[in-house]
Amino acid sequence: MDHPVPPSAGRPPPGFDARLLDARTLDVRAAAVLREIVEQYVATGEPMGSRTLSRRLPISLSPATIRNVMADLTDAGLLFSPHISAGRLPTELGLRLFVDGLLQFGELGDEDREAISTAVHAAGRSLEDTLAEASVMLSGLSAAAGLVLAPKSDGALRHIEFVPLGSGRALVVLVAGDGHVENRVIEIPPGVPPSALQQAGNYLNARLAGRPLAELRRIVADEMAANRTQLDALSSQVVEAGLATWTGEGRGGSLIVRGQARLLSDVTEIDKLAAIQTLFERLETQETMIRLLDLAERSDGVRIFIGAESEFFGTTGVSMVVAPARNDAGRIVGAIGVIGPTRINYGRIIPVVDYTARVLGRLLG
């Protein structure tokens, strides 16, 4: 079934100042009604009417009283009716007020904590594989798309090795000072013998001395420009191919998104499908990584973007929950998050994202 998308939070009634509205301005009855309607929307995507509400509310209210409260919440821009005879659904403004003031967070159980710690445990795996596993885990726990962003590491390197793959390609194995392993494939001239790959590796390892990759690039580039490398022609080409690959990654990092199909599970309308496709395309761009890191830099903890609030999504009916991953020194080393429909289970997802960000921060730090 195609679930209705809440109207944008930017269209309250004329003369209404949404900035003055928060959960504290609602009386007990209005808060109870809004909470119940949002929880029903998160669980099923379906609108709720006054009769159903009268049976489910923790306080005793008649259907007539509930209808009056729902009308007031609709006038305030917090609820809307998808059809004339239907019940009410929350607007994006209603979802925002619920998340900021009425949401009750769930507690992460030992099983969830163990699943997160296992997914982010990096022993014996490359950093790319670890991030991918963390993204898959987030998608599974949230029933939405999970994303993990790690900025390009420029820490000290311990070892570099070239492994022949055949067909004009070689695998570059990079071992960081903290033990993380990254594997990258580079193009090399056909017919390069293993001895040339060995010579290229020996040459680079002799100049590592715990230097970060950026500094190693500068040293090697200077030596090659001055013809002071004592490398044969084929080994020089291997080193140059490696340098070209690493230099091309200098502005970026790793952004891994898993579970995109979950964003399409309820979409049947062509315009919404096109909007989701646009979102997928944005997630693949360098600009998105930079903006996500910028969001993380400006966040002390978990941030929630609902629908039109986010410049990433416009009015596609998509929400994002994102948190910075910080190392022990408090420096941003990445970001993790979840992207899903506006009716994602915020109470469960927020603590999952928060805990995963802290675990991932210790790993990447």
Image (cartoon, rainbow, N blue to C red):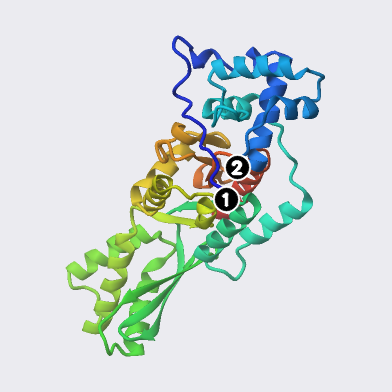
The 10 Å Cα crowd at callout 2, few under 14, some 14 to 19, many 20 or more, is: many
- Count of numbered circles on the image: 2
Does residue 322 appear in this view? no
From the image, tell me which residue sits under label 1: 144
The 10 Å Cα crowd at callout 1, few under 14, some 14 to 19, many 20 or more, is: many
At x 65%, y 42%, the residue is 44
Q: Nearer the viewer, residue 307 or 75?
A: 75
Image height of 258 relative to 282, above or below: below
Q: Position of residue 234 (x, y in %)?
A: 24, 83
Q: Residue furthest front?
A: 85
Does residue 241 appear in this view? yes
Instruction: Check disc 1 and report its element: helix, strand or loop.
Output: loop
Q: Nearer the viewer, residue 192 or 341?
A: 341
Q: CA distance from mark 1 to mark 2?
A: 8 Å
At x 30%, y 83%, the residue is 168
State left or right for residue 158 relative to residue 351: left
Q: Nearer the viewer, residue 25 or 355?
A: 25
Q: Earlier in the sequence, mark 1 or mark 2?
A: 1
Instruction: Check disc 2 and report its element: helix, strand or loop.
Output: loop
Q: Amino acid at mark 2?
A: Ile
At x 27%, y 66%, the residue is 244
Find residue 26 and name its label.
none
State left or right for residue 315 relative to residue 33: left
Callouts 1 and 2 close, C-beta under 8 Å: yes
From the image, tell me which residue sits under label 2: 344
Q: Nearer the viewer, residue 171 or 219?
A: 171
